[in-house]
Amino acid sequence: MYRAALLSAALIFSLVCTASAADINGKWKGKIEFNGESIDLVYDLKANGNKLTGNVTGPAGTLDLEDGKVDGDKISFQISFGDFHIKHDGKLVDGKFEITSHLDQGDQKYKIVRTPDLNGVWKGQAEFPGGQMMDMTYTLKVADGKLTGSIESPRGKIDMSDAKLTDDGFTFNTKRGDVNVAHEAKWNDGKITIKVRTSGGDREYTLSRAAESKTAESKSADIAGAWQTTIKLDDGTELPLKYDYKIDGNKLTGTVEGPAGPLEIKEGKIDGNKIAYKLTIMDNEVSYEGTAADGKINIKSHGGPFGDRQYSLTRPTSGITGSWQATFKMDDGTELPLKFDFKLDGEKLSGTVKSDQGDGAISGKVSGDDINFDVEFNGNTITHKGKLAGKEIKLKVNGFGSEWDLTLNRTAAAK
């Protein structure tokens, strides 16, 4: 009888709400409590009309479903283990199946749910302190029962750490500077609800699966705008070039400017993260193709007075790297000096901000003259968004439930 009970624990079966094979086919999971232990079960179901096949994996190994039937929102099947043959039936209730195992010592009931497909790109908007809304893009991958992923926002890209799958979602941490931020994710009706826990209070937002077209739009948006490079000619001459890409659907226009002035882009096309266009240089038609990756655009040119070449474009970020200073005026009128030290790696911005109140880690992104970053300070996230304007950086800052303006100037040592 113990073997029969253990087998039943391994068989807590899942089935779907309708007789549609599309709704039933796939993997499902559930748990059974047996002798004070929680036992995980994974089901692989296949429906063909009113016939159900598949298997369930648990403590007894992988066992086939026998005599499986589908009848609307009801299912039935049998599991055999040696001389034991245990019948099961189930009914869909509130999106979950309530399964009953018919044992000699009495019926036992369980609930099972469909295993969520987390793989792919997810998008949503999160509200930060001060009411600032930011686009959030999650890229998730599940392999061998383990979850990995990353999060991208105007503040930059950050990897998930300590990610763990749960019965109805997953948990993970992010780290900015020395501060770990805990996140809880719940799967609900094809969407993911994210709860972020910080010392300044919790915040919550919802992610939806990104359509392929929207993913392509995101990649296109990463290409539009200003870029720069310097080409070294055969005689050693360095040729600085400035690019201004403009995108309208799958059409690419704009200019490429060198020492001789700007040239108009012709026959420009964009497809996701790939571009192609032509320039007329000294009565020669030169064709170009490029691929955007990791904050750069890798270009190949064909023909023209300079021959075939390969080089990379980067966003213009000169003027931001280095030391800056500002003064924050507190509510009581006290002035608090701030010292910023910015470091750039492509578009990725890092560094520190120092004050008499302590130090904070900087993490963010720079695109042209636009600058967006967070400062993690005593468990609080302070967001900064602004622009390089001549010899100043003008920022809009959100933190501690309020918003204020802050102007940064170069430190004397950097001049």
Image (cartoon, rainbow, N blue to C red):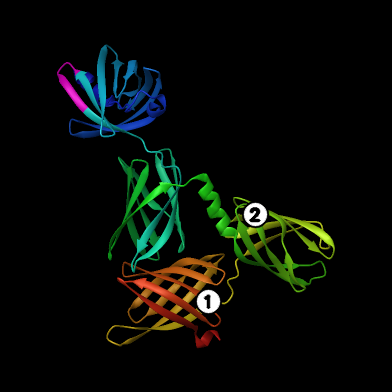
SS under mark 1 = strand
Please tell me whether residue 322 is drawn above or below residue 255 in the rendered image.
below
The circle on residue 206 is none
Q: Residue furthest left?
A: 105
Q: Residue furthest top?
A: 83
Please tell me whether residue 408 is drawn above or below residue 166 in the rendered image.
below
Residue 22: name its quadrant. top left
Q: Is residue 187 visible?
A: yes
SS under mark 2 = strand
Image quarter of the N terminus: top left
* Coordinates of residue 273 in the picture (x, y in percent): 60, 52
Tell me how far mark 2 sits from mark 1, CA to CA.
29 Å
Q: State left or right for residue 63 relative to residue 135.
A: left
User: Which residues make up the magenta segment?
Assistant: 103-109
The circle on residue 388 is 1
Q: Residue at x 15, y 19 (%)?
A: 106
* Coordinates of residue 104 in the picture (x, y in percent): 17, 16
Image quarter of the C terminus: bottom right
Residue hosting label 2: 251
